[in-house]
Amino acid sequence: MLRQSSVIQSIQEEIMAQIFTHTPTWVWLLLAGLCFLGFSQTRTREVSLQRVLTLPLVMLILSLTSMHSGIGSELITLGAWGLSVALSCMLFVRRPLSKKHQYDLTTQRFTIAGSWLPLFLILAMFIAKYALNISLAIRPELAQHTTFTLGFAILFGVFNGAFLARPIKLIRLRNRVQEQLTQTAPTVLKV
């Protein structure tokens, strides 16, 4: 029994070694870049709205290309993805912004409090995409299984919804600041 368990462990280690050695170098470089990007999100910083929108859009494109190339773009798959994006976004939008988040009307820039959540989401999305590609490389027929494709579509959708929630909350913050300014600004009478 002990011998059989060590043989199984040896086979598992060999499979994992094969997977990692057959992964192209650019994938590891991409992971390093994504880790750098995610780690930069842990510090408080000032950014423009365009910069705030960049990460969610990149992750949205990554998600859609992963689905298209890996599990297809069937209507049911895209529908499940879209629904999970919407539900996830609604849940994450409900979480209040930190009081450290600010919007400066004069510079039109946001001060964003550092958070580990973007790094976690980036890594989770990378791992999901990597797991999808490995699964399909080992068993290509999985792309035809509805449970498999819907599972990954929903997973990618949850991540995308989480990424989209922050820009929505920041745009709301900007709108509140602008509204407060117009309410407190003296009215000018035209004669």
Image (cartoon, grey):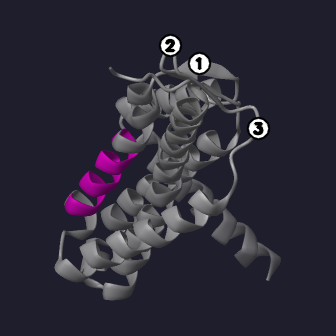
The circle drawn on residue 107 is 2
Q: Position of residue 127 (x, y in %)?
A: 52, 52
Specify the principal SS of the magenta part.
helix
The circle drawn on residue 156 is none
> Does residue 141 appear in this view?
no
Horizontal side, residue 4 vs residue 156: left or right: right
Categorize mark 3 by other alpha carbons within 10 Å: few (<14), some (14-19), many (20+): few
Q: Are marks 3 and 2 in contact (CB under 8 Å)?
A: no
Q: Residue furthest front?
A: 191
User: For numbered disc 3, what is the local secondary structure?
Assistant: loop
For the residue marked with disc 1, what is the amino acid? Glu
Which quadrant holds residue 6?
A: bottom right
- Estimate the spatial distance between the alpha carbons at disc 3 and disc 2, rounded to whole Å: 19 Å
Horizontal side, residue 133 vs residue 176: left or right: left
Which quadrant holds residue 3?
A: bottom right
Q: Residue furthest top?
A: 107
Horizontal side, residue 12 vs residue 72: left or right: right
Q: Which residue is mark 1?
A: 46
- Point out the stretch of residues depicted in magenta: 58-68
User: For numbered disc 1, what is the local secondary structure?
Assistant: strand
- Estimate the spatial distance between the alpha carbons at disc 1 and disc 2, rounded to whole Å: 10 Å
Q: Is residue 160 magenta?
A: no
Q: Which is nearer the eye, 1 or 53?
A: 53
Q: Which is nearer the eye, 156 or 13?
A: 156
Q: Which residue is mark 3?
A: 99
Say which residue appears at 45% left-offset and 22% top-offset: 188
Q: Residue furthest bottom?
A: 146
Q: Is residue 62 magenta?
A: yes
For the residue marked with disc 3, what is the amino acid? Lys
Q: Position of residue 13 (x, y in %)?
A: 61, 56
Q: Nearer the viewer, mark 1 or mark 2?
A: 2
